[in-house]
Image (cartoon, helix red, strand yellow):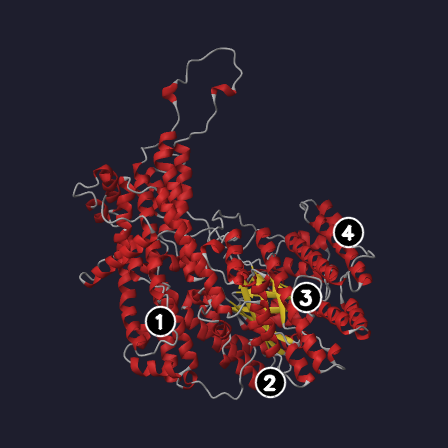
Amino acid sequence: MTGPALTTVADLTARLQDLHKLTAQTPLYNPVFQLGLELSRKLENGEMSLDDIEALVAEMECEGLRARAARLDRVLETIPVEENDARIDAAADEEDFTAFAVRWQRPAAHVVFTAHPTFLLTEAQTEAVAGAASSGDHSKAAVCVASAERDTITLDYEHGKAMAAIARGQKARDRINGRLFDIAASRWPKRWKSLQPMPVRFATWVGYDMDGRTDIGWSTSIRYRLQEKAMRLAGYVASLKDIEPKIAEKLERAAAHTEDMVARFSQDLSAPEDVSEAANALTANHPDKLISLSGIIGELEEEARHGGKEAASKLLVVAAAMRADGLGMGWIHFRVNSSQLQNAIRRRMDPDGKLNLASQAALVRMRELLAEVKPLKSNFAALAIENSTAVRQFLAMAQILEHIDADAPIRMLVAECEQPTTVLAALYFAKMFGIEDKVDVSPLFETETALEHGGRFLDAVLSEPAYRDYARKRGRVSIQTGFSDAGRFVGQIPAALAIERLQGRLAEAMAANGMVDVAALIFNTGGESMGRGCHPTGIDDRFKWQMSPWARRRFLRAGIRLEPELSYQGGDGYLWFGSDELALATLTRMAEKPLWAADPSAPTDVFYRRTDLSLDFYRAIRRVQHGHLESATYSRAITAFGLGMLNDTGSRRSRRQSDLNADRTMSLRQIRAIPHNAVLQQLGYPVNVIAGVGTASDGNREEIAEMLQESVRGRQLIRLVRAANALASIKTVAAYGELFNSAYWASRPYRGDEQHISEACLTLAEYLTKDDRTGVFRRLASRLRVDAMKLYKLLELIPDESPLPDREHTRRSLGVLQSLRIALFKHMFLRAVMVPPFSRANDISRDDVLEMFFSLRVDDGLAQLRRAFPIHFPSISDFAVDEPSDYPDSSASGYAQIHRDFIDPIARSHTLSLRITTAIANEFGAHG
């Protein structure tokens, strides 16, 4: 046996602890890489098999799922239904009916379910984690029986999951509304029936988001909206059939009519005649066609007015749901990119392409177009032939409002919106199609430029008379902020502070332009990870991170109604609504802590008072983050494995297709925020959260530490940094670079202990002499270490408010997982170079195939090997020929041995490494 026994997770953990002690003797010693080497040696000499590795991975995978369930349980504070009922009762403490009605008729938040690719957990794992968190049973028996077999994730899959999450949210909201009616009936028996509660409102953009996608056609959006309508009508029917059968029957007929439309719009609509048939069916007058619930709501409230308490309460709960959701599962958000809108408006404003759309001349011309525009009728034929993505979205919205749901407004989110002209262009098309009274145009602020100049942008837009008239008609000014891309571009802490400042600037701009009579709807979008806008330490921090009390007070003091909106993105986000109990707990926390609430008379936090310190602190962190983003070293390290460490977690591509040369020079701007953040987690160091904080305090550490400790906002920032730092390991970052160290591979068999792999090691060593990744990782690790040492000195001056009891256990678990994966990568690399020589095909050489494996384009590499060494080909028995043949004889068999010895082990190692990816992400609490 070579070295200590490594047969159990306990063995690995103990060994890693022993190896860590050696760093005191040799500072550059790397325990993670060394444990990976010891595992690799046992794997290569036969002491361990991939079966043994799989058993270890399964145990660690189980631990990650249990950690995920425990985290959800901890953050939600209390999950049992009865306890959350009691929490609602306690929160509804108003003694005056008017105050009670005002409070509970105002949504604590708008909740938006998006299709971001964070479907990390399999369906079975999601159910297991949700069930464990709901019951409080985090045992292995409760969580670890779930299959790790990956689901095929399509847009339909994502839409179905979003609808299931919303349905559970609706059920929870109904329960809360029922409690509110009971409370009101007991306190104000003569007035309670006039209550119209709306503790939360739901929305989705799954199937309506065109930013960066070409796979969502107009008929997809129409089909989804019809499906959502049919689902919601079925829900209303189920709620009313026993208490108001006449109305239920009417809604049931409307549901059947809608299901017929779903079937029609689910067919192939590529031919004009098929479009015509489906469109004519939907637009035709029909006795069962229902496009507004206003009459039904009136009927229900009238029936309730004359009914007894129990029946009236049930009717009013349904009416409240209808008022919130309309004829869908919630409101919908279309999304396009600003470039798509600019291309569309240029054809009308500047067909010759001579105007700069950022110029004053373009703004003047845009005002003229807005003044001249006349509403145009449109139909499905116009929608079907339109080739402009942006215009097609407005045409689709017009058809939805005309023929599916006339009541629910629609959001038009505009990504990368940096010019006032773009907002006015959206308003122009809304007016052109006669829907400006139902569409909320919402620019997205997430890029460096948008955040830096967002205040001036808002001043410019709100100073436009046409926009002010439109906002008053809609009753709100709408904007969207993006913590994901902002965190990628400038770092998460600078992003949060810049967005906070932008939110405050919106309040100033609205007040300066006399817009205090309309609401400010701010849609703050972020994921469930620290690098994408989620504060992990508790529900209070989670809600206040994206919309701080300071920002909320800016609106309260200006007398502006604030309508906060937050996102629950993809599978990670839907987990908060993964069961009835979780959905109720999530909404109850919102009801207890409305996202618009703040104390307007609170004294100014020292963080905002001492701008001489806090502003310099912010700028210094941003400089470090910007330096990393622009650094060739950082970019090469983060993209060293491409995106091969990551599972497929959504239907949207993580980046554009590229060739091998492009992979070697891949820019961070080519990959999206989620995979960027996910790669940082997998490499072991959340750079976009931690980097720069230590350096920013250098030279003024004591004064900055004092400010951060005295400041509520400052302590929140430090809690985020501590949470990220508890999971961070620079040794792990460095370990991945050593995989490409030619000297390591040349030296590994030098003592004669591993002669059976010496040729493979030498082949690797020779190939990697020209590889740059070892140096890149070493330089990055050095930069991170210098900054980290300064961070440790800062944190020593600030007391830890809530030290994590299992911090060291989690760090050891992460170290073991990383070591296991490094061993698997070594196994893949060795097997790849052991494959016998094969002929070049399609201009792809053996070296190209090796590089595919080194950059973890494993599926591509395996495809090339399977092409070169096929085992499935025509058999002579497939042919009915009369003449006999002695060939092929037994020596002419296929390449089964090559598959068994090389190709299959590579494939299995890759699969196991991706299971480790899931386990690591679960320890971080989210995919990316």
The amino acid beneath tag 1 is: Arg
- Is there a contact, CB below 8 Å, between mark 3 and mark 2? no
The amino acid beneath tag 3 is: Asp
The amino acid beneath tag 4 is: Ala
Q: Quadrant of residue 800?
A: bottom left
- Give the crowd class for mark 4: few <14, some 14-19, many >=20 residues within 10 Å: some
Q: Earlier in the sequence, mark 2 or mark 4?
A: 4
Residue underneath mark 3: 325
Image height check: is 123 above or below 874? Answer: below
Q: Earlier in the sequence, mark 1 or mark 2?
A: 2
Residue underneath mark 1: 623
Disc nearest the viewer among 3 and 1: 3
Q: Quadrant of residue 360?
A: bottom right
Q: Residue at x 54, y 86 (%)?
A: 600
What's the CA distance linking mark 4 and mark 1? 59 Å
Q: Position of residue 2 (x, y in %)?
A: 22, 45
What's the CA distance linking mark 2 and mark 4? 48 Å
Residue underneath mark 2: 559
- Give the crowd class for mark 3: few <14, some 14-19, many >=20 residues within 10 Å: many
- Residue 281: which numbered mark, if any? 4
What's the CA distance linking mark 1 and mark 2? 36 Å
Q: Position of residue 591 (x, y in %)?
A: 59, 74
- Is there a contact, CB below 8 Å, between mark 4 and mark 1? no
Disc nearest the viewer among 4 and 1: 4
Q: Earlier in the sequence, mark 3 or mark 1?
A: 3
Q: Earlier in the sequence, mark 4 or mark 1?
A: 4
What's the CA distance linking mark 3 and mark 4? 25 Å
> In the rendered image, is residue 203 in sight?
yes
Q: Residue at x 28, y 72 (%)?
A: 790
- Give the crowd class for mark 2: few <14, some 14-19, many >=20 residues within 10 Å: some
Q: Earlier in the sequence, mark 3 or mark 2?
A: 3
